[in-house]
Amino acid sequence: MKLAVIGSGYVGLVAGAGFSDFGNHVTCVDIDPSRIERLRRGEIPFHEPGLSELVQRNARQGRLVFTTDTAEAVRDAEVVFLAVGTPSRPDGSADLSYLFEAARQVGRSLTGFTVVVTKSTVPVGTGDAVRDAIGQVTSQRFTVASNPEFLKEGDAINDFLKPARVILGSDDPQAIDILRRLYTGFLRTSDRIQVMDLRSAELTKYAANAMLATRISFMNELAALADKVGADIEKVRKGIGSDPRIGAKFLFPGVGFGGSCFPKDLRALHDMGKANDVRLGIIECAIEANTRSKQAFAARMIERLGGSLAGKRIAIWGLAFKPETDDIREAPALDVIGQLRSKGAAIVGYDPIAGDNVRALLGNSISLVDDPYGAADGADAIVLITEWHQLRQPDFARLRKAVRTPLLFDGRNVWDPVAARRAGFEYIGIGRPSGG
Ligand code: NAD
């Protein structure tokens, strides 16, 4: 099948590479010429495990091409995916300006019947508005469908090529037939396609992210209580996670969630509730609890270090919003760094791959080093924010020799408190007052 993907970011590039790997001819479009230039040279503009090989293989074999020219990509394409960003506006609502701009460009480029699919995460009703916007600029026949994306950064290829489910939203049987055909290759073991109307598909994506984020906020609130009452949230987590009705995933307490999706999607969902006069109190609480978690974590450090952090040096381990990505959009590390700096701390950060993005954002206001042990040199505290594998079992004895003050803050509860104490550290985790 001939496909076009508009927007070559995390979602568009993974989808484009994934579809081409199944034998389709895919043209990926982006408005950023330097991004397209790099992609043509086989360079991936961000870190995603396995993506480079997938892109290079399919590009080499001629099934995956890159352009800044939407018209060239859309001409003769049977299906066009819109995968541009839908960031937050200052009031929390989703900014759909990129999406409608892309939709109008696609509309003006249509040369025959085409299925236009929103893959971006969009508020309910956007698909209908996209249909109107395209209808105003073309006389060609087209149909609009929703196919929200559920991939996780860091494991995106696996999620895309082996999806837990594929949601197809449309009332048009022809659109569903074409999209079904496109996805059949991905779903050999079982048919995991769910067909629904466009609006339900749009809402399903927000509902999924809101449920996952709410579980995290729920655990973070309970962790704060565990801290006060002398319970260990890690034991509580295992205790409830073993109940099949609850399940063990997304129950990990921590410094708070961040990233390019959860925070903005919760805000957009909350805004949708407001616009429709429906109070989404749970979503509101999940957002507030997340803000409190990040503040409480930093406040605990500030209190433990005596209020003023002037002259204190703090090592931050992990800057990306989660492991296996260099994405720092709304990364909790940035929040924590901001709070520590406002009290005068000097920050030395380490991340296996997100350092360049942090440098571009924060400039020289923090130091960045290439080695976690180097970051710990002369530090008054080591703080784990992103639980990269390589940071999970540090050599505490070596760290003890490097630091000025033997103090650990484990923002993900992954370090062994007993081993840390044995090496002479004071260990402070999240909701584990007795320290495991
Ligand atoms: P991104 O910012 O990485 O990529 C978007 C790309 O679109 C950019 O490269 C931008 O230059 C390009 N673009 C903007 N306007 C364009 C236009 N008119 N024509 C061509 N290209 C254009 O965004 P992302 O993280 O890939 O997210 C895209 C959408 O997918 C968002 O709605 C997001 O919520 C959703 N989503 C993201 C993830 C994720 O993990 N990142 C997962 C599921 C869904």
Image: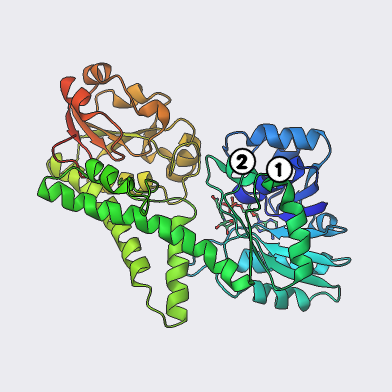
- 141 left or right of 366 in image: right
Residue for badge 1? 17
Give the answer, above or below, for where 177 lies relative to 344.
Answer: below
Give the answer, above or below, for where 324 lies relative to 78.
Answer: above
Question: Residue type at mark 1?
Answer: Ala
In this view, which residue lies farthest toward the bottom? Answer: 277
- What distance separates the C-alpha of mark 2 from that of mark 1? 9 Å
Q: Position of residue 140 (x, y in %)?
A: 86, 73
Location of residue 80 (image quadrant): bottom right
Secondary element type, mark 2: helix
The residue located at (80%, 33%) in the rendering is: 60
- 2 left or right of 172 in image: right
Secondary element type, mark 1: helix
Question: Is the C terminus in the top left, top right, bottom left or bottom right quadrant?
Answer: top left
Question: Residue type at mark 2?
Answer: Ile
User: Badge 2 local density, few (<14 within 10 Å), some, or many (20+)?
Assistant: many
Q: Position of residue 251 (x, y in %)?
A: 34, 48
Q: Position of residue 149 (x, y in %)?
A: 59, 55
Residue for badge 2? 157
- 112 left or right of 80 in image: right
